[in-house]
């Protein structure tokens, strides 16, 4: 019998997951949305309009669903959306649940930025129950952000990687030598389909890793590919810590607080380097995009290799 997947939040990374599920063709896909979407309907996706503040509304929408994938993100810190979604899933006997994570290694990150506080609170809900299988998917930073903004498939155009290949400007946190993980968003969708097909129990944490590199290597590859030099500004760890502390002292600007925190994380091996999955067979068959190859493909004037 064909399983039914419900995806909440089909923008950004959610759209990449929609593409992967449709391309695989093994599942019936439902998208939960606050409004209808003719674009999705034209692709054969059933769209169910929901009120995320209403558990009865979500319970009705999740009838017949086997797996819920949550990609909700830009929510108030006090949002109960994921808790409501979980209670509705529980009422319908949903078997598996993927929460909205798709970021850093959450084993190491349990707070610090208010705009993802709802994720931390919901992880605790999952950890304290045993009725629905779940996995927290960690991807670190999306590689897609090195693309020209207008060439990005779905991810927001408002964000720029610290190494900006369009303008050849770079703001490097710390010494630039710390290890960072960059993952292609389409590969995240492929990894989720792989997990959907895997009948074995899911691990508590799943790591979807593209390329492990450093900010300084991105600079070098960018200059090799384009034949141009970056205009580089480096911010010391001391300054990054000071900026984060000053931003927190003025909570009236939450975006400033978030960005100061992110820049501090960007300088840390501890936050930007994802571990390997305990099961090394996970994601066999997926050819993850390599960031160096991507840089030369998109920006290359000539091919070269890192010496």
Image: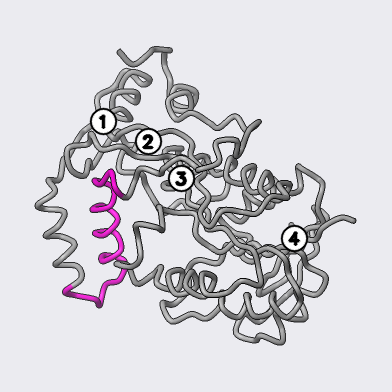
> Disc 1 on helix, strand or loop?
helix
Judge the density around disc 4: few (<14), some (14-19), many (≥20) Cα neighbours within 10 Å: many
Q: Is residue 189 left or right of residue 276?
A: right
Cα distance, mark 3 to mark 1? 17 Å
N-term-proximal mark, 2 vs 1: 2
Q: Main secondary structure of the magenta part?
A: helix
Tell me the mark number nearer the camera, choosing from 3 and 4: 4
Dots 4, 2 in contact, CB < 8 A: no
Mark closer to the chain start, 4 or 1 = 4
| Residue bearing mark 1 | 216
Does residue 232 appear to the left or right of 52 in the view shown? left
Label 3 Cα crowd, 10 Å radius (few <14 / some 14-19 / many 20+): many
Of callouts 3 and 1, which one flags the residue occurring earlier in the amino acid sequence?
A: 3
**Residue 81 at what x, y percent from top left?**
56, 77
Q: Tell me the distance, in whole angstroms, between the alpha carbons under discs 4 and 2.
A: 37 Å
Q: Which mark is residue 166?
A: 2
- Report, in whole angstroms, how far the alpha carbon at label 2 lies from the one at label 1: 17 Å
| Figure disc tally | 4
Disc ID at residue 178:
none
């Amino acid at each position: 019998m064909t399983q039914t997947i419900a995806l909440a939040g089909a923008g950004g990374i959610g759209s990449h997951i929609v593409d992967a599920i449709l391309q695989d063709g093994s599942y019936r896909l439902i998208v939960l949305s606050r409004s209808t979407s003719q674009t999705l309907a034209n692709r054969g996706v059933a769209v169910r309009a929901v009120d995320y503040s209403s558990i009865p509304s979500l319970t009705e929408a999740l009838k017949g669903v086997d797996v819920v994938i949550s990609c909700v993100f830009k929510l108030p810190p006090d949002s109960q959306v994921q808790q409501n979604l979980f209670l509705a899933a529980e009422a319908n006997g949903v078997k598996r649940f993927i929460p909205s994570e798709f970021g850093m290694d959450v084993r190491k990150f349990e707070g610090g930025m208010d705009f993802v506080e709802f994720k931390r609170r919901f992880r605790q809900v999952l950890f304290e129950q045993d009725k629905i299988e779940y996995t927290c998917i960690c991807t670190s930073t999306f590689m897609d952000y090195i693309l020209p903004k207008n060439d990005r498939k779905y991810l927001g155009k408002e964000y720029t990687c610290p190494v900006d290949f369009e303008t050849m400007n770079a703001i490097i946190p710390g010494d630039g030598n710390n290890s960072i993980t960059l993952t292609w968003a389409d590969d995240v969708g492929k990894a989720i389909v792989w997990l959907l097909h895997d009948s074995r129990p899911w691990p508590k944490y799943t790591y979807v890793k593209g390329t492990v590199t450093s900010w300084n290597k991105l600079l070098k590859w960018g200059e090799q590919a384009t034949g141009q030099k970056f205009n580089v500004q480096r911010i010391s760890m001391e300054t990054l810590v000071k900026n984060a502390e000053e931003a927190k002292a003025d909570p009236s600007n939450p975006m400033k607080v978030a960005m100061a925190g992110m820049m501090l994380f960007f300088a840390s091996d501890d936050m930007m380097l994802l571990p390997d999955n305990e099961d090394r067979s996970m994601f066999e068959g997926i050819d993850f995009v390599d960031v160096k190859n991507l840089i030369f493909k998109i920006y290359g004037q000539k091919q070269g290799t890192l010496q």
